[in-house]
């Protein structure tokens, strides 16, 4: 059996892929992950379906230990090295952090019946682009707004922003 961390990572990838599929976006997984776990790609329906060339890079995380004391945000302790990769303003493809919040009890993470597959809790996203450097060396607390649910509508909106030349 794979480690608990790898099970969490696999669920975060499955969650994002399911949401992206529902939004009609394509997911690409880099052969080697240097801070990017997945890329979302917009698809246009012109004369058939075609890759639109609109890309959004994602770093995926999952946690059972999110700081949920603030009703407006969830707190996630992110390695400073990951924070620095995500805050870079000079990269041509925008990047966001997606954090899947899971229940503490692993038995509650997922359930399946003949009629449904349930992944419990939800994922949130945030862009850290342009954020300042931090003085710490190990981890820094990222605060993801609870309004930033990672949903099919979110995927559509984020890719539309990128297509228009903006950033998330």
Image: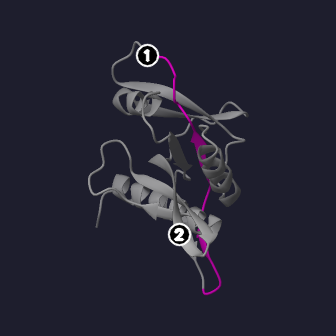
**Residue 8 placement: quadrant:** bottom left
Reply yes or no: does residue 167 show up in magenta.
no
Taking 114 as reference, is 37 above or below it?
above
Q: Residue at 70%, 56% (x, y): give it.
A: 153
Q: Which residues are magenta?
A: 114-133
On the image, the x and y values in percent for residue 60 come to: 45, 48
Q: Give the alpha-carbon distance from disc 1 to disc 2, as whole Å.
A: 41 Å
User: Which comes before the other along the chain, label 1 or label 2?
Assistant: 2
Callout 2: SS? strand
Q: Residue at 38%, 46% (x, y): give it.
A: 36
Which residue sits furthest front?
Answer: 47
Mark 2 sits on what residue? Answer: 50
Which residue sits furthest bottom?
Answer: 114
Q: Is residue 146 visible?
A: yes
- Frontmost residue, 67 versus 30: 30
Does the CB distance between marks 1 and 2 fall below 8 Å? Answer: no
On residue 110, the disc is: none
The overriding secondary structure of the stretch rendered in magenta is loop
Mark 1 sits on what residue? Answer: 134
Callout 1: SS? loop
């Amino acid at each position: 059996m794979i480690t608990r961390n790898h099970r969490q990572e696999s669920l975060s990838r499955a969650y994002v892929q399911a949401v992206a599929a529902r939004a009609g976006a394509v997911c690409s997984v880099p052969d080697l992950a240097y801070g990017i776990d997945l890329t979302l790609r917009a698809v246009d329906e012109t004369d058939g379906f075609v890759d639109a060339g609109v890309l959004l890079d994602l770093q995926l995380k999952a946690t059972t230990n999110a700081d949920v004391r603030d009703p407006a945000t969830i707190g996630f302790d992110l390695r400073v090295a990951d924070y620095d990769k995500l805050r870079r303003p000079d990269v041509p493809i925008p990047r966001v952090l997606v954090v899947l919040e899971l229940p503490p009890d692993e038995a509650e993470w997922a359930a399946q019946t003949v009629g449904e597959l349930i992944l419990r809790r939800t994922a949130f996203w945030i862009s850290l682009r342009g954020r300042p450097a931090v003085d710490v060396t190990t981890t820094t607390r990222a605060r993801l707004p609870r309004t930033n649910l990672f949903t099919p509508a979110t995927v559509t909106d984020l890719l539309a922003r990128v297509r228009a030349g903006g950033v998330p």
